[in-house]
Image (spheres, rainbow, N blue to C red):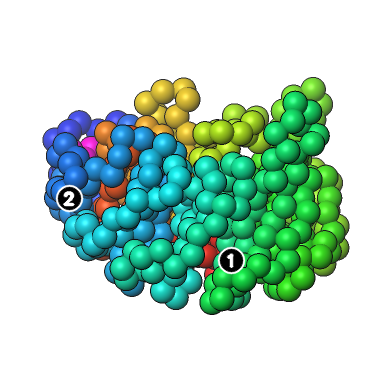
Amino acid sequence: MIVPIRFTPLFLGLLLSLGVSPFIQTSLAGDLTVDARSAVNVTIPKPAESPASFKTPDGKEGWVRKISGEALPTPAYAAGRIFTGGGYSSRIFMAIDALNGKLIWTKPTQDNGPTSPVIDRNRVAYNSESCHTEVRDTDTGNLAWSEVTGGTLLTQPVVVGNLLVIPHPIMARKANAADDHFRMLSVDLKTFQHGWDADMTSDVLSAPVTAEGFVYFTCTDGRLFAIKSGTGGEEWHVVAHATSAPVVVGKTLAITTEEKLLNRVTIGIRRYDISDGTLKDEKPLAPTTVSAAKEPAGGRAGWDYQGPKIAAANQRLFNAPGNIINAVSVEEGTLLWRQTVAGLSNQAGTLTPPALGKEKLFIGSSTGHILVFKQSDGSLSCAYKFSEPFTSQPILAGGNIYFGTASGNLVCLKLNDPDAQDWHAWGGNSQHNKVD
């Protein structure tokens, strides 16, 4: 257990000037707690359509700019540019200079709600809530291809080799929901010709992921699927109580689940063998009863749903249900450490899915925190507190961290950390499955 230590502002400033971390933790058996109220407070200028610079009390620089008036999904990075839409009801998509926040281009979308984008070479692709998939040139923003691919598109596409794979509904629009159908379409990114169109049992949670020649995904009915990326044929599927998109590390697939066990709801991690979907764990790993979002009912809830998405690096699985961060061994399934983030501004405060460097874990909170931990032992490296609520997974590029905020702003904090690299999209890359 932690023994909390509080510092006066004068003493805190002295520690920061000396390069000493004020976050002192004591722990037993890897069970850690950090008090987020000790984070460095950052004052930023009122966001506008032009980028505004700011500086933190410990000398870090950054910029912020107004994109819209509503929550932004995770942006994507490529070739010195940040690509983002404007939110659920917006009809804009843009490219921004990652160094200074200046606008490079902006384009109107055909429908509202551009999702988090994926990038392949000089193409950036996204779905819109109603009801197109669009592919644009990254340099000019010009539309390369678009098509109505579903009645309501709530999830992100994924890049699989030369294919763009798009979860999409075929809505019968009848009173009986059983008449609605959901499928997954492959489109060639060079010719934009349709390939396979596979059947699903319900809509996808967040996004499919791809690895080892397969596309893996979870559905809102809790099922977990593996289909062949070349043909769309089903390899296997299992009932999994899934509440997050999967991550694949070697021959192991992991998801976060939410199950009723012993008359209470338990949130945990389950591991599966990717060859046949065999469950590796009798009980959920890193179990907790901390609240995590269940599968969305649709609409806005489905469009911005992420769940406690697992990230993986260095043979460790990391997820963040509620205000808890877990680190679990990929091979043994043992809990390596658990970090509880105390002192969030309200009881409903939650953490975003983490982004990973080679040695550190970067995460935000819905109460405006940016927190950086060591992957090896969960110890805190640095922490900042903004007035902006962060709700989507961040991206990492060039030593910087980038967040889209719940109030429609794009924030860049220049950590000057060489580990803040190469996490360029939701899930880390355009396959939504970056692992090291």
Q: Image point 24% across, 43% down: which residue?
A: 66
Q: Which residue is mark 2?
A: 51
Foreground: 196 or 387? 196
Residue span colored magenta:
39-43
> Disc count in the image?
2
Q: Main secondary structure of the magenta part?
A: loop
Foreground: 214 or 254? 214
**In 3D space, how far apart are the residues under numbered discs 1 and 2 (Cα atoms)?**
33 Å
Element marked by disc 1: strand
Q: Which residue is mark 1?
A: 164
Q: Position of residue 426 (x, y in %)?
A: 49, 55
For the residue marked with disc 2, what is the amino acid?
A: Pro
Asked if residue 185 lies left or right of residue 337, the reply is right
Q: Earlier in the sequence, mark 1 or mark 2?
A: 2
For the residue marked with disc 1, what is the amino acid?
A: Leu
Relative to 10, does residue 252 appear above or below in the rendering?
Answer: below
Q: Quadrant of the C terminus?
A: bottom right
Element marked by disc 2: loop
Asked if residue 113 lies left or right of residue 158, the reply is left
